[in-house]
Amino acid sequence: MAKKKDDNTVQRVEKHIINENHELYKLLNYYTFLSKNLYNYANYQLRQVLILTSKLKEGKEITFEQHEYLNGINAKVDKFNELREVNFQKAKQRAIEQGKELNK
């Protein structure tokens, strides 16, 4: 089944119904549970950052805990970006050794 979006793109969606007696049911049920929790956790994190940055943009006060939360997020983002840069440099070096061109 394909759902049509407003911006002329198609999003492919599939639905598989698995009976509780199926040998993979427990495993798939566990993974869908983890997937749902990961989705909700990511949504929560994004919502918190959006709320806090909106408050800062409007010049409103934020609590000490909210300030610490933003500092923690920024530290994690910085660490992630450093890791990406290291991986890019490694890939760039491999590409140079193989005679390929790699754009950033």
Image (cartoon, rainbow, N blue to C red):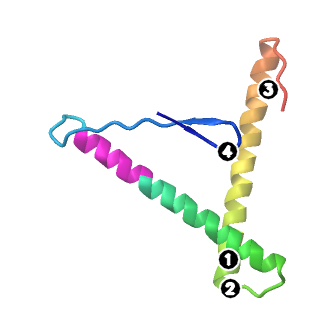
Q: How far apart are marks 2 and 1 (CA)?
A: 6 Å
**Residue 39, percent from left and from top:** 50, 55
Task: Determine which residue is flagged by label 4.
Answer: 6
Label 2, label 3: how far apart the Cα atoms are: 42 Å
Discs 2/3, front: 2
Label 1 residue SS: helix
Q: In the rendered view, does 33 fall on the left or right side of 74?
A: left
Whether pointer 3 and pointer 4 mark residues with C-beta atoms closer than 8 Å, the reply is: no
Q: Magenta stretch: dominant SS?
A: helix
Image quadrant assignment for residue 74: bottom right
What percent of the width, then of the height, locates residue 68?
Answer: 67, 77
Label 2 with label 1: CB-CB less than 8 Å:
yes
Quadrant of res 44: bottom right
Amino acid beneath label 2? Phe
- The answer to which image quadrant residue 51 occupies is bottom right
Q: Mark 3 points at which residue?
A: 92
Q: Position of residue 70 (x, y in %)?
A: 70, 71
Residue 98: numbered disc: none
**Where are the magenta residues, as a range?**
25-35
Inspect the image, locate mark 3, and give the three-letter code of the amino acid beneath it. Answer: Lys
- Name the residue beneath numbered marker 2: 64
Is residue 89 shown left or right of residue 10? right
Mark 1 vs mark 4: which is more N-terminal? 4
Distance from Cα at disc 3 to Cα at disc 1: 36 Å
Query: In front: mark 1 or mark 4?
Result: 4
Mark 3 or mark 4, earlier in chain = 4
Q: Residue 68 carries which label?
A: 1
Q: Position of residue 97 (x, y in %)?
A: 79, 15
Q: What element carries label 4?
A: loop
- Outermost residue on the left side: it is 21
